[in-house]
Amino acid sequence: MFKTLFSLPKTVWLIGLISFVNDAASEMLYPLMPLYLSAVLMAGPKALGLIEGIAEATSSIFKLVSGVIVDRTQKTKPWIVIGYFLAGVGRPLIAIANSWAWVLCIRFTDRLGKGLRSSPRDALLAESVEPNQRGITFGLHRSMDNAGAVFGPLMAAFLLSMHVPLRDIFLWAIVPGIVAVSLALCLREPPKEPVLAQAFSWSLEGLPPQFKRYILVAGIFALANSSDMFLLLRARELGVPQEQIPLLWAAISLITTLFGTPLSALSDRFSRKNFILIAWCAFAFFYIAMSFSGISIWMLCALFGIYGLFKAATEGVEKALVADLAPKGMAGTAFGWFNLTSGLMLLPASLIFGWLYESFSPSYAFLFSGSCAILAFLLLAFWVFHCKQEHRVNI
């Protein structure tokens, strides 16, 4: 694995470094958002669900837009640079927000940047390597991204321990934002074969039936996977001290960092579908277990460890599977539709979860997510790839 890892193109490593820096800034703030909204802006779970749902839905829509444009223009770098610029500018502005509505607007800008850069970045990664290196490539990217998610919360915990106000911590996010944009400007696109100009198309035309079924099931699973901020809110309610919330989130990211690359690399040799099925099963178990009250701190830590392994086994593998299913010249569109479907469902997912959480109880919200995950598991196992007449990819 290490020989293959170090033979990957410089572009792959540079994109990974950019994601590390950007995620360090993002995840330094992410675990503080529920605390900031509740303690400073006096907003509850419903407002949190609305903010995260709209923000992620915006990101998802523009992932399709940028993906289709990339396939037609064959240019990825401009969208990657613009995307990181918007995120780098938007995040620090949370420090001057005086209501949750302003936070919503700022998160909208941040996620707009993510939407513009994600599909072009994924397409650039897929085009930079051979098909049998996609698993390890996307796994490395996700591992470096999650390494930033380890560093960021640790910085947040350190600043909180030094009694730095929450608003000031948000201001510090501008520094890694500037670094990420500077690194993005250094990206180089690989040589591409000339393609005939095509009209812009936002439909699924030209994508195989297996891919269409897969993104439908991924959408159902995304309905279960609401904002992770609810997990941190739940952990706080179950007794985790406020200053340890960022550390808990850093631990999840550390597990994902350590296991993301090797698990994704294994999917280059074995079935990507089976990796995803096992991970979705672990997700369902985690959410159902989180529905119970009276969970001890040690049990909670073990459950969050399972959640970290779920993320490690899916983040890179799911994208590698999308690249496997995408026809030549349609990688951007395929990633756009995958990101749109899975991300757009986060709006109803977060709204439903927040409504169940606040109107009834956390148990109902977590059981709802666990049930959706089980349904997606069954459909992926017995429906998505089961059609004898169609060409089968290495799944």
Image: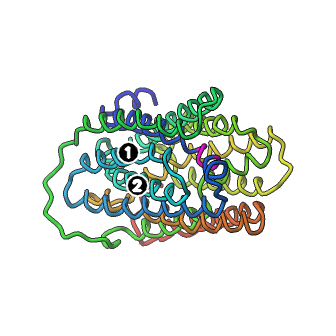
Q: Who is closer to the viewer here, 278 or 355?
A: 355
Q: Residues within 10 Å of mark 2 (few under 14, many from 20)?
A: many
Circles 1 and 2: CB atoms closer than 8 Å: yes
Q: Position of residue 215 (x, y in %)?
A: 47, 65
Left or right: 274, with 171 as reference point = right
| Vertical placement of residue 74 versus 142, above or below | below
Viewer can see residue 262: no
Number of numbered labels in the structure image: 2
Magenta portion: prevailing SS class = helix
Residue 193 percent coordinates (x, y): 16, 51
**Residue 204 at what x, y percent from top left?**
35, 71
Question: Residue 194, can we see it?
Answer: yes
Residue 109 tag number: 2
Q: Earlier in the sequence, mark 1 or mark 2?
A: 1
Kind of residue at disc 2: Thr
| Rendered residue at 47%/69% (across/down) | 213
* Membership of 54 in magenta stretch: no
The residue pinned by badge 1 equals: 89
Q: Quadrant of residue 195?
A: bottom left
- Return the residue nearer the eye: 352 or 384: 352
Q: Is residue 214 left or right of residue 298?
A: left
Query: Residue at point 34% right, 54% down?
Result: 116
Q: Splitting the image into 4 quarters, where does residue 241 fall?
A: top right
Compared with 143, 358 (above or below) is: below
Q: Amino acid at mark 1?
A: Val
Q: For the magenta stretch, what is the residue range? A: 31-35
| Residue 8 position in % (x across, y down) | 34, 33
Tell me the distance, in whole angstroms, between the alpha carbons under discs 1 and 2.
Answer: 9 Å
Query: Vertical placement of 282 versus 344: above or below?
Result: above
Residue sitting at 43 percent across and 43 percent down?
138
